[in-house]
Amino acid sequence: MTTRIVTGVDASETAAEAARTAARLALSLGAELHVLSAYGKLEVERLKAGSDEFVYSSEGDALSVANEVTDALRMEFPDLKLHTAAAVGQPAEAIVRAADELDADLIVVGNKRMQGLSRVLGSIANEIAHKAHCDVYIAHTHRR
């Protein structure tokens, strides 16, 4: 029985489409969906304006991207149990690590960069498919 699904997102429409596919699968299987956005390394910038201090971070940016996707999924799939997170590392590495930590049954990724020359050079989906310790579903998100 599938209980946890992990999907990785960035700000692209293809990632949002893969997340919608993951949501449909999670809903049909009665599973919870974990939406993850990766960031390369933790960078923090503090800006002061008078007595106010603003903190910007790469982790915060990644979490913001994941929250945007999750908010859209909540509107479309109100009965779905969703979790949002940001994780340090390259996307494939972060997604596989999160799936391991969550004991996920399935990772859903899009097929972006699996066509043409990029396919030869590698893609996130390809790397995940080779390194994951659970099933991987590659959603068709690339439209010609």
Image (cartoon, helix red, strand yellow):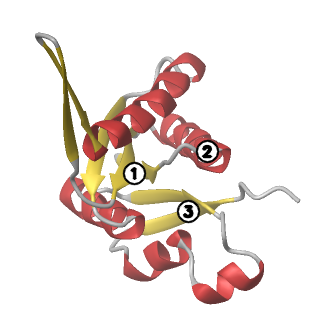
Residue 65 picture quarter = top left
Quadrant location of the C terminus? Answer: bottom right
Q: Give 65 or 21, whichever is nearer the viewer.
A: 65
Name the kind of residue labelled 2 in the image. Answer: Thr
Chain-order first, disc 3 or disc 2: 2
Cα distance in 3D space between marks 1 and 2: 11 Å
Residue at numbered disc 2 = 21
Q: Secondary structure at mark 1?
A: strand
Query: Quick one: which residue is furthest to the bottom in this view?
Result: 120
Cα distance in 3D space between marks 3 and 1: 10 Å
Position of 95 compared to 114: left or right?
Answer: left
Q: Give 113 or 104, whichever is nearer the viewer.
A: 113
Name the kind of residue labelled 1 in the image. Answer: Val
Position of 68 compared to 96: left or right?
Answer: right
Please tell me how crowded label 2 is: few (under 14), some (14-19), or many (20+) other residues with Cα within 10 Å: many
Residue at numbered disc 3 = 137
Which residue appears at 75% of the width and 76% of the height? 115
113 relative to 80, above or below: below
Which residue appears at 51% of the width and 34% of the height? 27
Q: Are marks 3 and 2 in contact (CB under 8 Å)?
A: yes
Residue 84 picture quarter = top left
Residue at numbered disc 1 = 6
Q: Secondary structure at mark 2?
A: helix
For residue 94, the mark is: none
